[in-house]
Image (cartoon, helix red, strand yellow):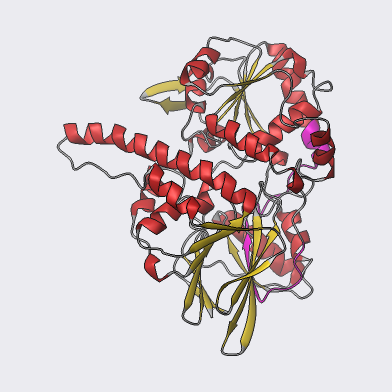
Amino acid sequence: MHVEFFGATKEVTGACFLVHVGKHRILIDCGLIQGNYADEQRNYAPFPFNPAQINAVVLSHAHLDHSGRLPLLLKKGFQGAIYTQTASRDLARIMLRDAAFLNQKESEWNNKKRLRKGLTPLTPLYSIAEANVAVRRMRTLPYGQTHTIVPGVSLTLHDAGHILGSSIVELRCTEAGQHRTLVYSGDLGHSGAPILRDPAPIEHADLLLLESTYGNRRHRDWDATWEELGHTLMQAQKGGGNILIPAFAIGRTQELLYLFKRHYQEWEMNRWQIFLDSPLAIEATTIYSQHAALYDAEAHRMHHDGDPFSPPNLHYCKTAVQSIAINRLQGGAIIIAGSGMCDGGRIKHHLKHHLWRNNCHVIFSGFQARGTLGRRIVDGAAFVRLWGETIKVNAQIHTIGGLSAHADQTGLLKWLDGFHAPPRVALVHGEVEAMEGLRDKLHADRALNAVLPQFGEHLDL
C-alpha cells in the first residue's frame, strides 16, 4: 500500500493523488493546474500514470483545481466510477461544462492567430460532451455512509465545510491482512463561516494528507471581518463609485449574497444595486438553495424565512448585453463577477472600465494564486495589461482575508487535534512558504515531523 503525489505538491492547484492497494489503484481528485500561462499549459501534458489502469476515482469537491481534469482522464482511458458527495455532483455538472466551454472558446481564439502564423491548431482540453460524460460517471454518497469502492478499500465522506458538498475523504484499506486508514482533508473549511457546518472531526488516520493553503497565516476573527466588510461598503458608498468583487462562482458568491441579506439594514445595503454578473454563479446559487440540509443552524433559520441568497436589490445578469450595460453605471453598483482570481470571465471587462477610477473599490475576498491577475493587483501592481491595453490601477484595493473558505493555521491545528493519536502528516495544496510555516509549527508545538512530498514521490502506508 502506498500513495503517489501527482499534483498540489508545493503548489495550491492541480490536486491529484494515486493510492495503490494490492492490484487496485484509486485516484483522489484530478484537478486543473491554475496560474499563469505556463502553469496552465501543464494540463495538456500526458498523465504520469495510465488512466486505463485506475479502478476508481474519489472527488473531494467540485472546484476545478480538484475536478477539472476528470473529463480528460476519461478521454485518456479511465473506465471506472467517480465517487463524490451528492451536492458535489450537482456543482461539478455546471463547473465542468463551463470549463469546457471556456476552453473551447479560448482554443478557437488562439487557433485563429496560429493559423495566420502557419502553426498547427490546438485541440481543446475536452469538449462539453466529454464533460457531461464525466458527470454521468459520478456515483453519489451522503456524508457518513461507508461504501466499498474496490475490493479491500472502503470510502467514507465527511463534511469538510469548505463549499457545498465538500468532503474529507477517508479510505480504509486492507492488503495482505494489513489494515491502514488514509485520510485526505480536501479543502478544509474555515470554522464559523456562513452557511455551512464546521469541518467534521476525524478520530483516526495512519496517514493524513493535509491541505496547507493558509498554513502560515491566521485569519481575522469573524466579528472583525464583518466589521471590516461593512466599513468598506460604507466607505465606498460615500465615495460615490462602484464596487467590484471578483468572486468564485461556487462558495464565495453565495456567502456574499447571504451576508448582504443578513446585514441588509446594518450595512445600509439599500443604497446599492447588486449585480451578480456570472451565469455560472447564478446556477450555483440555485443549487445551493436546493441543498438546505447541508446548512448550519443559522442558515437553516434564514432558509425558513425565504431564500437566504436573495437580497431585495439583487439583479441577475445572464447575458453579455446585460453585463455590458452595467458599465454605463458610474456609481452605486456592487458588481460580483468571476473569475475569482481575475484570470478570465466578466470581471476582466469590469476592471478595464473601472480599475483606473479613483472612486472605484475592488474587494478581494478569496485566495489569489501566484501568477494570476488578481495576485498582481493585490501585490500592488501600478499598471496591469488587459487585452493589450495598459490600465492604471487607481482604484482602492481591499483584501478581506477573514472571509476565506480555507482553514487558517489555527483552524488546521485545531482540527488535527481531534485525532485520538497523531497521524503521519504529508502537507499538500499550498505554496512552499505556507507549507514550511505549518510544518515548523507542527514540529514546534506538536512534535510532528510533517513531510512535503515532491511531485512523483510516494509514501508507504
Displayed quadrant of residue 121: top left
Kindly report the secondary structure that dominates the magenta region of the rendered protein.
loop
Residue 106's place in the image compared with 172, above or below, is above
Q: Between residues 84 and 392, which one lies in front from this camera angle?
A: 84
Q: Residue 450: x, y in percent?
A: 63, 70
Q: Position of residue 231 (x, y in %)?
A: 77, 24
State the residue in front, 186 or 396. 186
What residue is at 73 percent from the left and 40 percent from the top?
402
Nearer to us in this view, 300 or 413? 300
Quadrant placement of the N terminus: bottom right
Tell me the residue at 62%/14% (across/down).
Answer: 359
In magenta segment, residue 204: yes
**Residue 48: horizontal and vertical position, in percent?**
38, 65
**Vertical position of residue 182 compared to residue 300: above or below:** below
Q: Is residue 354 magenta?
A: no
Left or right of 161, for residue 24: left
Magenta residues, as a range? 201-226
Is residue 28 at least partly visible in the picture?
no
Which quadrant does the C terminus fall into?
bottom right
Res 227 seen here: yes
Spot the residue most to the left. Answer: 118
The residue at the point 69 percent across, 37 percent down is 289
Q: Is residue 408 above or below residue 221?
A: below
Looking at the picture, tell me which residue is in the foreground, 417 or 294. Answer: 294
> Does residue 212 appear to the left or right of 370 in the view shown?
right
| Residue 11 coordinates in the image, percent (x, y) | 51, 55
Q: How many marks?
A: 0
